[in-house]
């Protein structure tokens, strides 16, 4: 079983918050405790731990930008992609070159290395 952990992007202070205490209510409200309890929807964007670590042992969170190297396909190529949560699982959004279709591929199809995150370094993300 994986650990359920979160970090949060603090949109007001433009920084990542790693050590958080959360209170989640049945109506969907989430409060974050730093020095005091604050409602997250205005200030914080919660990012969930995927349960996986990159090739350097760093925990991978939703919103991380990773260098993705396929391990199951013959054509060796790599790309920088954002870790997203889609249809009940963490994956990478991948545009197919042969069509305009976008597919979501499971993280376990790749060797992954974190190179940044979407909040602090969006310029690393390749155009879709």
Image (cartoon, rainbow, N blue to C red):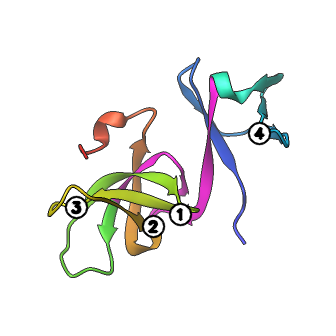
Residue highlighted by disc 3: 96
Distance between the Cα atoms at labels 4 and 2? 27 Å
Asked which secondary structure carries label 3, the reply is loop
Q: Is residue 76 left or right of residue 65?
A: left
Of badges 4 and 2, nearer the viewer stands 4
- Give coordinates of residue 110: x percent, y percent: 38, 70
- Of label 3 and label 2, which has the lower sequence position? 3
Q: Answer whether labels 3 and 2 touch (C-beta < 8 Å).
A: no
For disc 2, the neighbor class at 10 Å (few under 14, some 14 to 19, many from 20) is some
Asked which secondary structure carries label 2, the reply is helix
In the rendered image, which quarter is residue 93 located in?
bottom left
Residue highlighted by disc 2: 107
Q: Residue at x 76, y 25 (%)?
A: 39
**Can you say which quadrant of the picture contains the N terminus?**
bottom right
Residue highlighted by disc 1: 53
The magenta segment is: 43-67
Residue highlighted by disc 4: 28
Q: Is 27 part of what is drawn in magenta? A: no
- Give coordinates of residue 99: x percent, y percent: 18, 60
Distance between the Cα atoms at labels 3 and 2? 17 Å
Pick whichever, 82 or 28, lies toward us: 28
Q: Residue at x 45, y 53 (%)?
A: 83
């Amino acid at each position: 079983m994986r650990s359920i952990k979160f970090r949060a992007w603090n949109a007001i202070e433009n920084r990542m918050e790693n050590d958080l205490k959360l209170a989640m209510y049945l109506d969907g409200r989430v409060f974050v405790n730093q020095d005091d309890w604050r409602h997250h929807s205005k200030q914080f964007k919660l990012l969930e731990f995927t349960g996986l670590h990159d090739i350097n042992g760093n925990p991978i969170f939703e919103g991380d930008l990773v260098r993705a190297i396929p391990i199951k396909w013959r054509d060796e190529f790599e790309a920088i992609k954002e870790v997203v949560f889609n249809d009940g699982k963490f994956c990478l959004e991948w545009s197919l070159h042969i069509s305009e279709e976008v597919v979501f591929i499971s993280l376990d199809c790749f060797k992954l290395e974190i190179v940044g995150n979407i909040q602090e370094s969006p310029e690393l993300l390749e155009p879709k």
